[in-house]
Amino acid sequence: MKLAGKQVLFSIAGVAAVVVFIQQVYVYAPDEGSLGGPIKGLTAPELRKFYETREVFKKEFTPEEGLGPLFNGKSCFECHGQPSFVGGEGRDVAGTGVVRIGVRDLSHRNKPLPEVIAKLTRADVDIYLNQGGPALERKSITSEFPSKYPIECQVEFPSVPKDAELISMRHSPPLFGFGLIDAIPDTALLKNMFEEVRTNPKLTGRALPQVDPLINHERMGRFGWKCQNPTLMLFTMEALNVEMGITTFFQQFPKSAKNIFEFPHCIYQYLPQEPNDVGNITNKLTYFQSLLAPPGRGPITDEVKRGGKVFDKLQCSVCHTPRLYTSPEVFVVDPDSHAPQLQWLEIGALENKPVDAYSDFLVHQMGVGLADGIPQAGANGGEWRTTPLWGLRKKKFLLHDGRTTKVEEAILAHGGQATEVIENFKKLSHQDRQDLMAFLKSL
């Protein structure tokens, strides 16, 4: 329980003392620090706003609120947590994931695809911007809400083009601890990158600075499978736009599977004004995700401790950096403010805190086995952000495409810069391998 407000003591006729609490006296957060619950140490007003904004995360939006014309989900919860933890991973891969598509440019088809897939850049790939790409949206407002629209206004949703040779499934990841990740200063990420150079140049990741339009300046990419988003707010805006079709102040046009002017003309009379959201949705979703508690560790047994040493010996900890720290001052958008005059709230519970995510938040070349050929925001076809390992014991699907549920299979899929590490992993004794698995399953 948390005590908030002022405590005032009154003496009644000198006989008894009555304790009167002004404002909200007790705030009980039964899920504080747990998956889907708030981070520890929040004030009473912060907790109240957390639970209020969590309802927005679970809310199903309507076409009148901006959903569509094409979309993948009606709510954030649909792809991140249903049916269990709010903010968790997708319940499956095909239904709640994202499909990205592409085809090599004609001038780059002179070699077999496996020879070049890991090195493809944006200049080498047609991402089907006029045919549904790069991310397919597989539902439409007219297919999901047929009673609202006449038959002549039907909006067709796309399928994978017949000539697509690059088809990449992206599993919806858990969002736990995202506020802590957002609060890591760029200097800490860059310092850690140079530490990787000193420790093992072969394993050094690559930083991907991305422009933050809120400050008209670059910040280090850290969110998304390929570090395509530098901040949690931009990550949220992209998800609203691509997955739900809801436009925002900085993404004022819907990402559609067609050129927006190719929809049936009559559909425009049913579409709400753009942008659909000037902060009421974006800010609340950003605030909620910012205060989601990080995953906790499992029991630290002797076997787990030995496995941690094996993890370090293999140099897995070079890329999967065990711990970083947040800034001494951390501000989160006020969920009640609106763009472009955003207001910010200082959140002490996020300041100077350890971030035990086991990631360097850099991209690494992972080889042909994991390459999808889809370039994104400066990352090429075989580069991926180091996946955070915290919460691994609670995850069901592993790797970007959720291809396996087994930790060892996920490890063995690593290639590229991790090839030498994986060869050493294969040489581990039975005991060392058991210890390593115990360690990973404690995260």
Image (cartoon, helix red, strand yellow):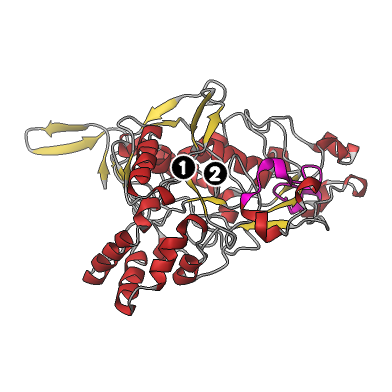
Residue 336 in sight here: no
Q: Which residue is mark 1?
A: 288
Residue type at mark 2: give it: Val
Q: Secondary structure at mark 1?
A: helix
Q: Is residue 313 shown above or below 245?
A: below
**Magenta segment:** 119-142
Between 109 and 307, the residue placed more toward the observer is: 109
Residue 59, which numbered label?
none
Relative side of 361 to 45, left or right = right
Mark closest to the chain's N terminus, 1 or 2: 2
Residue lying at 49% horizontally and 56% vertically, measured from the top left? 88
The reply to whether the C-beta atoms of the residues labelled 1 and 2 are less than 8 Å apart is yes
Q: Which residue is mark 2?
A: 56
Residue lying at 40% horizontally and 56% vertically, measured from the top left? 35
**What is the quadrant of residue 235 in the picture?**
top right
Q: Secondary structure at mark 2?
A: helix
Residue lying at 87% horizontally and 48% vertically, measured from the top left? 154
Between 8 and 222, the residue placed more toward the observer is: 222
- Please provide percent x and percent y for residue 68: 73, 44
Relative side of 141 to 226, left or right = right
The stretch drawn in magenta includes residue 123: yes
**What is the quadrant of residue 186 in the picture?**
top left
- Looking at the image, the residue that sits furthest to the top is 341
The stretch drawn in magenta includes residue 108: no
- Between disc 1 and disc 2, the foreground one is 1
Relative side of 374 to 262, left or right = left
Between 16 and 35, the residue placed more toward the observer is: 35
Residue 120 in sight here: yes
